[in-house]
Image: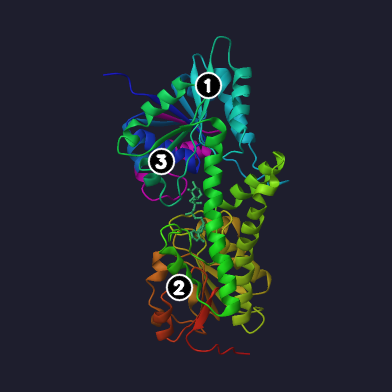
Amino acid sequence: APEPIRVTVVGTGYLGATHAACLAELGYDVLGLDSDPAKIADLAAGRLPFYEPGLAELVERHTASGRLRFTTDPAEAAAFGDLHFVCVGTPQRRDSMAADTSHVEAAVAALVPHLRGDALLVGKSTVPVGTAAGLQQLADELAPAGVEVGVAWNPEFLREGRAVDDTLRPDRVVVGVTDPRHEKALRELYAPVVDAGVPFLVTDLATSELVKVAANAFLATKISFANAIAELCDAAGGDVVALTDAIGHDARIGHQFLSAGLGFGGGCLPKDIRALMARAGELGVDEALTFLREVDAINMRRRSRTVALAVQECGGSVLGRRIAVLGAAFKPGTDDVRDSPALNVAAQLQLQGAHVRVHDPRANATAARMFPTLGYADTVEDAVTGADLVLHLTEWEEFRALDPALLAPARRVVVDGRNALDADRWAAAGWRVRALGRPAVGPLATVSP
Ligand code: UDX
């Protein structure tokens, strides 16, 4: 039998750890490289440093089988692989809206001088269009004499909370290449995935880089569209949930990513639309994307409008009020709190003098690291008991399953920031239910002095 393909994965954060474990699952020998020794120590011991359903099991299984190994040594990684995936982060820059590509460049600069034979670098990180071409230049400059280093792009579309499934059973595999040999290598690598009927789409470097950010910009636009209509429903007395359900039945529109509420957060959508606008500006076509400024503004307004609704339900001020916040993660199924709308709202209310107690089934610990001054509760009951107001801000299944009759707040008022609770059931248990874009349900507020 031929030797299995050997793959290195540079960057073992969210994207890299998932990609590495899934390639091991497909039968390849995989070496993960990261500059963070703590992360590498965890992973090498079969421990996942964050929560993602199903991924810990894969990491454990394949570190045990020996198919998945980890290192901090770029020379070891350079000697190991035929293919080198670049999966490092591209966060928003501190000084602008643009993406910071320094980690991607550093990864290439660390690896390439150690290569001893021809190699293919495959970028998966979300980058500004043009980055791949720049990395090819960098690789050409840094490659040892006689060594040919190619650069291809293979954007990743995984969603947190469903990362393993999205990686092993994606909607499509997209590769950007400059050389048919690179296409062949990637086709071979992804054969076990593509043979199950997944489209394998081949394009140029720039298009492949743009596919990723265009997809995320479209998804963000869909959400903000629903939220803009929610503002209209508030003004006119309509119900955005009934409305989006009705328009979603048109197959051209569809129901997905049309849920109005507190809006989008996380490590991708907010930063990706800002980076795309910044890149369009650099390319002299900022006009093409000015609508994304509105998409961002509508989205950020959800947070302030939710705060305003909480203030209103507390009779004009939250000063001294006890507020329970259900949810801290930016969405259910993850412990990721990057740019979390829930925590943003919680922090704003605390700034206005409320006593906030946050409970999240998974994300309390990560939230407490980022917002150490907020109050945290280990259970829903601890958060809610005695509260003047309950905010439901991340739609975990646990929260939907709550029996509202069994909760013991000081006042039965809930703001459903995700339009996910069964409002009639809560109203039947004596709760007043408020949400953005929907009429109030249940008894009128009785605001205590
Ligand atoms: C996203 C893309 O979906 C994924 O393809 C890409 O690779 C990375 O970015 P992710 O950030 O994991 O994935 O989260 P996603 O499921 O897209 O949700 C993003 C945010 O939008 C969450 O805060 C979610 O609560 C919010 N959202 C989603 C809505 O407010 N309404 C919706 O209808 C859908």
| Residue located at (55% from left, 18% from top) | 114
Measuring from the top left, give residue 111's x and y in whole percent. 55, 24
Callout 1 amino acid = Gly
Quarter that holds the N terminus: top left
Cβ–Cβ under 8 Å for marks 1 and 2: no
Up/down of 428 relative to 343, above or below: below
In the picture shown, does residue 403 fall above or below 52? below
Q: Which residue is mark 3?
A: 172
Q: Which mark is residue 21?
A: none
Cα distance, mark 2 to mark 3?
Answer: 32 Å
Q: Amino acid at mark 3?
A: Arg
x and y, in percent, of residue 137 in the image: 63, 22
Q: For residue 88, say whether it is visible.
A: no
Residue placed most toward the observer, 183 or 445: 183
Q: Residue at x 36, y 35 (%)?
A: 63
Q: Residue at x 64, y 79 (%)?
A: 320
Q: Is the CB of the residue bearing disc 1 within 8 angstroms of ligand 1?
A: no
The residue to which callout 1 is attached is: 150
- Which residue is at the front of the view, 75 or 432? 432
Label 2 crowding class (10 Å Cα cut-off): few <14, some 14-19, many 20+? few
Considering only order in the chain, which callout, 3 or 2, is on the residue closer to the N terminus? 3
Range drawn in magenta: 30-57
Query: From the viewer's perspective, is 362 left or right of 306?
Result: left
Is residue 292 on the magenta stretch? no
**Residue 419 or 357: which is nearer the viewer?**
419
- Report the residue that reaches farthest toward the top: 146
